[in-house]
Image (cartoon, coloured by chain):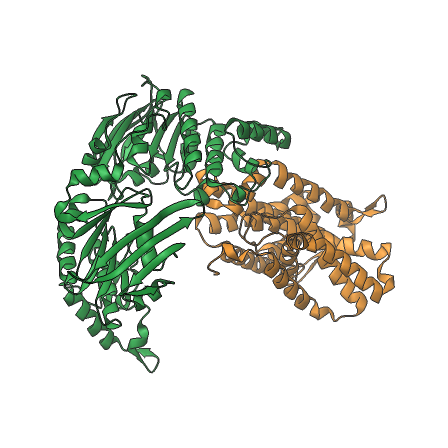
Chain colours: A orange, B green
Amino acid sequence: MKYIIKYSPIISLFTLLFAIGIHTPQFLQISTFIIIAEDAATLFIMSTGIFFVIMLGGIDLSVQSIASLCSVILALCLPQFGYYSFFIAILVGSIFGLISGYFHVTLKIPSFIATLATGGIAASLSLVITNASSVQILQEEKHYIRWITDTSFYIPNELLVSFFIFILCWFLINFTKFGRYVTAIGAGEAVAWTSGIDVKLNKYFALILSASLAAISGIVLSSRMSAGSPTLANEFLLPAIAAVIIGGTALTGGVGSIQRTLIGVLIISVLRIGMTFIGINIFAQQLVFGCMLIIAVALTIDRSKIPIVK
Amino acid sequence: MNNTVLSTVQLTKYFGEFIAFENANIELKENEIIGIVGENGAGKSTLLKCLNGLHQPDKGEIILKGNNINIKNPTDAAKNGIGMVYQEQSVLPNLTVAENIYLGQEDKFNKFGLINKTKLHNFALKKLIQLGSNIKPHYKCSELSFADKQIVEFAKVLTLEDNVKNNLIILLDEPTSVLEKKEINNLFEIMKELKNYSSLIFVSHRLEEILDISDRIYVMKNGEVIDSMKTKEATIDKLHSLMVGKDLKHKYYKEDLQNNLKKKVVLEVKNLSLNNAFENISFSLHQGEVLGFAGVIGSGIDQLTRVLYGFLKPTTGKIYINEHLVELNSPKDAVRNGVGYLPKDRRSEGLIQFMSLSNNLTLTNLNNLKKYGIISRIKEINLTNEWVKKLSIKANNVDILCNYLSGGNQQKVVLAKWMHAGVSIMIMDHPTRGIDVGAKKEVYSVIRDLTNRGISIIIVSDTIEETIGLSNNIIVLKDGELKQIVKSNKGNKPLPIEILKYMV
């Protein structure tokens, strides 16, 4: 049973591919896989950020609003600042991470409220600065975003960007002090504190990292769409959290991995694209993600550890 | 003579491998107060908790008024007329006195789904008057003094009378440990009054109190009831010697390896005070010394150890480490100043249960595993293997989750964790709690080994013998004051009674 649960994400992934393939054989083509990978790329970047916060035992609900805000900022800044716009967008994202950190760590507000509030602020801000309309990236600015939209060696660059982020975060969680501390805090905050770890600082870092990665996913998304929009990343939050949890990262913190998050994201993307192939109503997608999230949590959570559910 | 109302037959309780108490036979008669004495960890509190249904005994019987009963939980105990006044109070501060007294019994006052407040207050008032108190039922409990809250606790127990016809059994788990002298006298008046229509079991560290109030006394030691006597026949000295036993086991505590006191002072504490805990404590700790802290619960030693590790901030006073004035605002500051902490509660503060042995061990110091900012797993595994060998930690591999290690091995991992961090001062809060004899011996060896490397140790222990056996000097606290510093040199150890007389 233990092994079934451990390997269930990867088994699910292949079962899904197989099932959709039987129903619609055209699904199993290289071109479809590239569509799936492209779809997964932005979601994955966002999920890795949330992954760090969930590993800590918290949650980040601000990511979709931050991604949208940063897409708008990128589109607005490109004409004037060129390549610097990318840094500006990431900087703005990280400032929102800092704000979440201040609410959660310094003011000691539970992370889901703190990030929900930060997300609200970000969402509203992007509506205000754009007057609730989308901002096009014009033809003459397109050369700035070609490092994302081009293809190198038949591989779309956005895949390379997310692959780079995968490697970076894999390193971060497995081989750095920060990664070790995040895992330790998620698994036993009192022990971590007693061992002399700066719990507050590491929580700040994780929230800033999550927000910065959300900003990057917003950048990649807006480059793909050639536009920034205050609602660009709407509908991303649920699948992003679902991906982390379906991959097998424990909602209670301390257990999980980047590889698993990747598999979770792939499951979500295969489902998403697969449903279109089979012809399921696109509006029913969130319904499926919602159900999958609950099933995944119900399977992975260790209830003996949590006497009280708040 | 009076009839027996409650008795236990060969009652036994284990926590895993750890024996809380074994084959306990106790008898409580009508209108009687019995006292149970014993050191910390002797099993007194756990015994009471079994009678109240908080713990389930593993063996033996509880016989109530001639019937063999099975107490599943405190509600069950209440139905049988058994109530308990806890060491830590269980009064909810945001409710009124009356609401607290009848907490969980609101059905009695139910009127069309609403609570009939007038009836509730009248009922509560009756109980308060019965206890001779002038607390009003509508007071918020957060506004009450500590002693008044205790009265509310008693009133809560008295509500059991409404359900049970014949006499109540009231269990008191060190109710006096945080009370003032006057309040204690008041409490005793209440107890004498209660005795007219109930039977009481009273657990306390303070022998005078037991002698004062009880009719008969049971003595517990290491989980066994070793003696019982009529209070008339007992004296403080007699109880002392029973509680701590006679001979000191020199070899057991590896006394021959004890360091002689060195000159160098590593930690100096000057006039340290913490509100409501301790006052004006000054002492110094030398290099390679084992300094024992002795005192009963409520004496302030618990808070003092926590202040020295930065968990609590002292109100006034100064702490010097290696002659530098330091401020310990959090454990991080303590670790930075070379202080390590072995917690009383291994599971929640010592080790991360669902993290591997190697990850736990290196948590206190990851810097020396790093190369270009990257943690080297190879170095980590090698280093963990070294410690596993050095402290003979029994583990299949270094990646085993700490949850699967035995208590003794877990304790050794905590020790290794701090040795790896390179601390110069270790604060050990009950280092041998809940581990078996073999593992205890190994912990003693590690302690001697640490001191021979020049590490200084502050130790708070479960038993006086252990404190005496391990320490160079013993600081005795009573009611927040430093009563005495007792020398405990190699080959010239004080008798337990010489420590106990300052403690109680």
The residue at 28%/20% (across/down) is B491
Residue A162 percent coordinates (x, y): 72, 46
Residue B66 percent coordinates (x, y): 28, 65
The residue at 86%/57% (across/down) is A29
Residue B387 percent coordinates (x, y): 53, 28
User: Position of B331 compared to B283: left or right?
Assistant: right
Q: In the rendered view of the protein, which quadrant contains the N terminus of chain B?
A: bottom left
Query: How many callouts does the rendering have?
Result: 0
Q: In the rendered view of the protein, which quadrant contains the C terminus of chain B?
A: top left
Nearest the viewer among B132 and A41 is B132
- Against A175, is A307 above or below? below
Nearest the viewer among A137 and A216 is A216
User: Position of B80 compared to A206: left or right?
Assistant: left
User: Position of B2 compared to A84: left or right?
Assistant: left
Q: Residue furthest bottom?
A: B112
Q: Is residue B425 visible?
A: yes
Q: Is residue B52 visible?
A: no
- Against A62, is B465 above or below? above
Nearest the viewer among B423 and A203 is B423
Nearest the viewer among B248 and A83 is B248
Residue A265 percent coordinates (x, y): 70, 54
